[in-house]
């Protein structure tokens, strides 16, 4: 093969269509003019941002006039539109990080800074077989689905049907419909994952729950040797209990833990300084890997310390103690309706070259 032919073969497609002629799920939703049913970010001349859902005949009202949705529908992403009194608005499709923070929710979401760490540090690769619990509002599920791709596999477990409905609506909104790699099941993770997944068949396990140490046997059963188990926990006591349980089990490597904090910067001429606010502690990430069957992990030598937990410690891990607020059924139903409403985007006909 000549160098010219090799270069042509290696050149990436400019149409975003895979070699098999199929466009990746959700790609069309990120391109082209704005369509009815889409969420759009409006930023005014003072930097104030609002997210709206486009509706034919609808209008966005503020104390400074109104903007008809029809003025936005059909415009290119990144356009500037003007309302009835001359107020300008910059229009953009929300990025994933924007969508996650503004989407309908019934439970607290995994922040983008943590989702990015999970995808990278757990090595979620295209085609990977991943299981997660609990789903919450689907924020992390979206990031995991983007990472595993159309040919991967993500099985999500959620105990509450209302949360599953909200997550399903949010996932289908951003991908433009059901994702071929996603399966969501209701029930307790410890029981359901061993019923649904063959032993040693899962590449990655991602847990966002109050007591991940209770899932040791289930994770060890389904996770392949060398597979990664990553936990997202909110408090130091949860972090300590999970780490000690993993060490005592012996089927996993020495766990690593960290947290990430994001601080923005103010940029205006020579006034360059850190922002007064930052996204600080949201949760801890703890990661370990499955050892081969019959292998005992190497214990890291350390000074003796207290590793036993009393009743007072256990009480510190209840939902109320860690700051988890109860959500009313009415709010969950409303969030589910809002999430499902986001799936009603009128897609334009596909354009093929």
Image (spheres, rainbow, N blue to C red):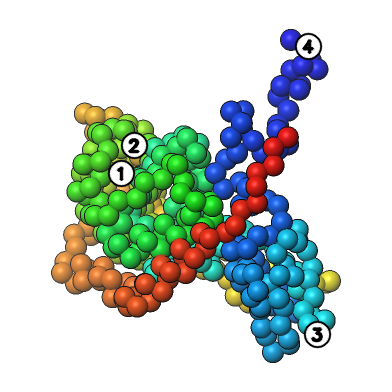
Q: How many marks?
A: 4
Residue that carries the numbered disc 2 in the rendered image: 202
| Badge 1: residue crowd in 10 Å (few <14, some 14–19, many ≥20) | few
Q: CA distance from mark 1 to mark 3?
A: 70 Å
Residue that carries the numbered disc 1 in the rendered image: 301
Residue that carries the numbered disc 3 in the rendered image: 85
| Badge 4: residue crowd in 10 Å (few <14, some 14–19, many ≥20) | few
Mark yes or no: residue 259 visible: no
Number of the front mark, 1 or 3: 3
Residue 84 vertical placement versus 282 (above, below): below
Can you say which quadrant of the picture contains the N terminus? Answer: top right
Task: Indicate which disc, 3 or 4, sits on the residue closer to the N terminus.
Answer: 4
Residue that carries the numbered disc 4 in the rendered image: 2
Viewer-nearest residue: 272 or 351: 351
Disc 2 is placed on an element classified as strand
The residue lying furthest to the left in this view is: 311
Q: Residue at x 41, y 59 (%)?
A: 167
Q: Residue at x 73, y 61 (%)?
A: 74
Number of the front mark, 3 or 2: 3
Q: CA distance from mark 4 to mark 1?
A: 58 Å
Could you say where residue 296 lies in the image, as x and y percent from the top left?
Answer: 24, 33
Residue 8 vertical placement versus 87 (above, below): above
Could you say where residue 19 lies in the image, as x and y percent from the top left?
Answer: 62, 28
Q: CA distance from mark 3 to mark 2?
A: 57 Å
Please give left or right for residue 234 compared with residue 127 in the image: left
Task: Indicate which disc, 1 or 3, sits on the residue closer to the N terminus.
Answer: 3
Residue 47 lies in quadrant: bottom right
Residues at circles 2 and 1 in contact by the CB criterion of under 8 Å: no
Disc 1 is placed on an element classified as loop
Disc 4 is placed on an element classified as loop
Task: Indicate which disc, 3 or 2, sits on the residue closer to the N terminus.
Answer: 3
Can you say which quadrant of the picture contains the C terminus? Answer: top right
């Amino acid at each position: 093969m000549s160098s010219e032919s090799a270069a042509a073969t290696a050149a990436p497609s400019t149409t975003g269509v895979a070699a098999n002629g199929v466009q990746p799920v959700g790609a069309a939703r990120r391109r082209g003019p704005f369509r009815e049913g889409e969420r759009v970010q409006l930023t005014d001349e003072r930097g104030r941002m609002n997210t709206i859902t486009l509706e034919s005949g609808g209008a966005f009202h503020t104390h400074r006039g109104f903007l008809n949705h029809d003025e936005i529908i059909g415009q290119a992403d990144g356009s500037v539109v003007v309302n009835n009194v001359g107020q300008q608005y910059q229009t953009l499709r929300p990025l994933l990080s924007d969508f996650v923070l503004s989407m309908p929710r019934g439970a607290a979401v995994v922040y983008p800074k943590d989702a990015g760490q999970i995808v990278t540090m757990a090595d979620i690769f295209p085609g990977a077989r991943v299981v997660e619990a609990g789903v919450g509002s689907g924020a992390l599920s979206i990031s995991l689905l983007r990472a595993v791709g159309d040919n991967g596999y993500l099985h999500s477990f959620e105990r509450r049907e209302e949360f599953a409905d909200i997550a399903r609506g949010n996932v289908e909104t951003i991908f433009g419909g059901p994702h071929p790699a996603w399966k969501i099941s209701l029930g307790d993770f410890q029981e359901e994952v061993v019923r649904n997944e063959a032993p040693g068949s899962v590449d990655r396990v991602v847990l966002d729950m109050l007591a991940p140490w209770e899932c040791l046997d289930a994770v060890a059963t389904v996770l392949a040797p060398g597979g990664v188990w990553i936990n997202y926990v909110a408090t130091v006591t949860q972090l300590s209990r999970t780490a000690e349980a993993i060490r005592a089990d012996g089927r996993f490597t020495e766990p690593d833990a960290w947290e990430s904090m994001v601080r923005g910067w103010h940029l205006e001429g020579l006034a360059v300084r850190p922002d007064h606010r930052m996204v600080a502690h949201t949760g801890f990430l703890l990661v370990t890997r499955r050892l081969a069957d019959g292998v005992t992990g190497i214990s890291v030598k350390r000074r003796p310390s207290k590793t036993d937990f009393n009743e007072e410690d256990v009480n510190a891990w209840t939902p109320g103690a860690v700051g988890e607020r109860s959500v009313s059924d009415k709010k969950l139903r409303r969030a589910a309706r809002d999430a499902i409403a986001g799936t009603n985007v009128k897609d334009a006909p596909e354009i093929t070259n």
